[in-house]
Image (tube, grey):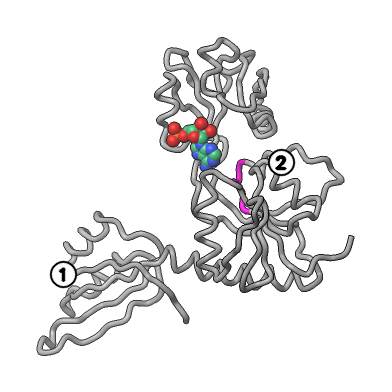
Amino acid sequence: MKPRDRLRIAMQKSGRLTEPALELLKRCGLTFRQSRDKLFCFGEGEPVDLLLVRDDDIPGLISQGVCDLGIVGRNVLNEYRRGADGDAPALAEWRPLGFGRCRLSIAVPQDMEYREPSDLGGRRIATSYPGLLSEWLKVQDVSATVVTLAGSVEIAPKLGTADAICDLVQSGGTLVANQLRETDVLLQSEAVLAGPDALPADERGDMIELLLKRLDGVIQVRESRLLLLQTSRTSLDAVTRLLPGGPQPTLLPVAGQPDQLMLQALCAGEVSWRQLEEIKKAGAREMFVLPVEKMLA
Ligand code: AMP
């Protein structure tokens, strides 16, 4: 097979990850022209194309070398890793992407007595993640029957085909609607950038490195907030101690008020109302939290 000179990224054709993944790539400066069959998107500026597929197929496509990278849920990637035969190239999680967050959990009928994993002994558990569930059961030293289903796992206990389930949970609404109760979390999941364990030793490897750098910048900015506030010099220490993580704040004088300072801090992550209220109690006022659009250090 002739080596490709364009990078190819696999992503979900339609589903929860599609829109946020496209938005993230756009923020990395990648835009695409969609083909008529809507399976292939040609990269317009950079030599990076997209293949739009079912999310379950993504790890296999990377493993076979059909695609260089994939944007896929950690749940799908890790399930594939459990099932992949030893000869298949190893896959790595290159970056967590911060969207599509959910968890893979055990849930039991609300009226079932459950205190600990050993209560699942001898029971049937329905799941679309037999690899991850079997591994967890082994770690817990519990012997249970894994019932593999392709979908609609949450109705298995009502249908009598299983006693408990192991499924993805986001808000928990599906569990409540099916009179189920979440008991154990097996995996915290989100969309990740997946790829081969080692970068290709050609131009595509260089392109992947470039993309990773852009991605890091975009993710850092997306999670950053600029906090602006005014404080007296005497309250400065108390206020500074409460600032969320980030580089050292910048201090500016306030015209006509020599005892006052304007403080500017770049915060890594959300600044909650509670944090703001605490900082205000310590002596700050005129507080603003602003999103960061672009950052060039
Ligand atoms: P929820 O009712 O919000 O807890 O969502 C649970 C339902 O959505 C289950 O049917 C899950 O299989 C599905 N689900 C939740 N999060 C994800 C995700 N990130 N990727 C795929 N399916 C998900």
**SS for tag 1?**
strand
Residue located 87% across and 46% down the image: 87
In the image, residue 72 lies in the stretch drawn in magenta: yes
Horizontal side, residue 43 vs residue 155: left or right: right
The majority secondary structure of the magenta stretch comes to strand
Horizontal side, residue 252 vs residue 173: left or right: left
Residue 154 at x, y percent in the picture: 52, 23
In the image, residue 48 lies in the stretch drawn in magenta: no
| Residue sitting nearer the eye, 4 or 195 | 4
Residue 43 lies in quadrant: bottom right
Quarter that holds the N terminus: bottom right
Residue located 50% across and 54% down the image: 20
| Among the two numbered marks 1 and 2 on one chain, the one whose residue lies closer to the N terminus | 2
Q: Relative to 2, is 96 above or below?
A: above
Q: Which residue is mark 1?
A: 285
| Residue sitting nearer the eye, 22 or 269 | 22
Foreground label between 1 and 2:
2
Residue 273 at x, y percent in the picture: 25, 55
**SS for tag 2?**
helix
Residue 45 at x, y percent in the picture: 61, 73
Residue 289 visible in the current orientation: yes
Residue located 15% across and 77% down the image: 232
Residue located 15% across and 81% down the image: 260
Three-letter amino acid code of the residue under disc 1: Arg
Q: Which residue is mark 2?
A: 80
Q: Relative to 54, is 178 above or below?
A: above
How packed mark 2 is, by other alpha carbons closer than 10 Å (few <14, some 14-19, many 20 or more), is many
Horizontal side, residue 285 vs residue 247: left or right: left
State which region is magenta: 71-75
| Residue sitting nearer the eye, 136 or 215 | 215
